[in-house]
Image (cartoon, rainbow, N blue to C red):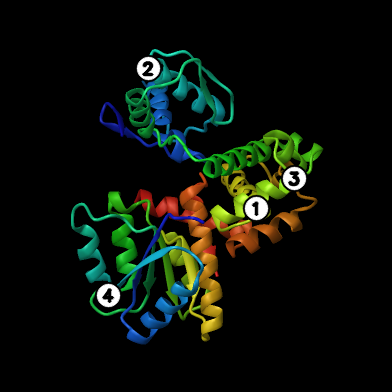
Amino acid sequence: MLKKNSNEIRIALIQLPDRDVARPFYLSLFENRLYNFDFSTPYYLMKLYLKYDINIIFRKTLEEQLGKLGVDYSINGLGEVEFNEPLNVETIKELTSLLSIYGIEIINDHKSEIVQRIKDSITEMIANSSIEKQHKTSTYLSEKLAYSYAYLSSIFSESTYTSIESFVILKRVDRAKALILEDRLTLTEVAYTLGYSSVAHLSGQFKKTTGLTPTVFRHIIRERNKSLKN
Amino acid sequence: MNLDVLKIVLVDDDEDDRLLFKDAIEEVDMNTNLLLFSNGQEFMDYISLSGQPLPHLVFLDLNMPIKNGMECLTEIRSTSKLKELSVAIYSTSSSDKDIEQTFIKGANIYINKPNDFKKLKKIVRQVLKLNWQYHTSNLNRENFLLSI
């Protein structure tokens, strides 16, 4: 990928949980940073650990692309953009193609929109453990999206082949995987961060979702990354 | 009602197994489109044709003539345009070592072949639904592992 004096620099760990949304943009951002890196110091860089906020990336991407249209807009958070004047078909087409490079799609039916907003809210809830500690998922979602939980839950099940409850578990385990691979926290700390009552509870749900224990999972991913390098 | 179609490929040399699997997939209440191949080489030839739409999920039997499941998996993972493909290996082996090896070689799902149709249906349903989430919900596909 990036070369300096023919020494290849391998970027070993870039976690992109929302890779479908912002990957190309994210990578370009990352490369720009790296080009500004001072390579003159004798520094053997093999791994970079990055901290990032997917919401900022998403917002910045939107702002950049919407800026190209030359129309007034405001971003209402959670994937909602409001325009001050109606858009014509050409502009919508242009925006669709501008955003498609980043894997961002314009949703134009009510149910898909609700489902997407539920998913986004759950992602936010799991990333921010204080929300989860203060609210039940059902109250959080119905307050945030201003629909009854029964309504949200039936739309969700009907179009995603899963229930909101199962989706929350899947998302939480996905985050647990990322934290386990980051290796900065112990299993106990991961369990606490994600609001599990104990390591046993985390391991149980992990095993139920993946068929593997957290330790075996980490071992496999590490071995896989090693074998891909060779 | 979800109108998106889940495109599935099944590669297995045993005709009875193929039919059984096909029945199981058809009984899942999802909109699916299934293609069948009888060995790894046939599938690789098909998928290498340019402009071929990629399936969402490929089921690979391990023991096949000409090109077996492991060789096929290795080839898939070393082909850049196939990197995003979810691969499910299914085999009669339930040894932890075999399971671990297939995951390390890049499989996402390991299915221990069940011996009755009811179990097969249950497993297929669970795999299809989980895979669907990975294709529609911004989950990290590089960390997608399921042993069942």
In the image, which is nearer the foreground, mark 1 or mark 4? Answer: 1
Using residue A230 as the reference point, say whether residue A66 is left or right of it: right
Q: How far apart are marks 3 and 2 (CA)?
A: 38 Å
Specify which label sits upstream in the sequence, 2 or 1.
2
Secondary structure beneath label 1: helix
Disc 1 versus disc 4: distance between alpha carbons?
42 Å
Q: How far across and how far down the image is residue B7, in percent?
A: 37, 61
Residue picked out by circle 1: A154
Q: Mark 2 or 4, which is nearer the eye?
A: 2
Q: Earlier in the sequence, mark 3 or mark 2?
A: 2
Asked whether, in this view, residue B50 is left or right of residue A168, the answer is: left
Q: Where is mark 4, residue-wise? A: B39
Rendered view: A29 above or below A186: above
Mark 2–mark 1 contact, CB under 8 Å? no
Q: Which amino acid does label 3 sit on?
A: Ser
In the picture of the structure, the residue carrying the numbered disc 3 is A138
Q: Do labels 4 and 3 share a chain?
A: no
Whether residue B53 can be seen here: yes
- Asked if residue B147 can be seen in this view, the reply is no
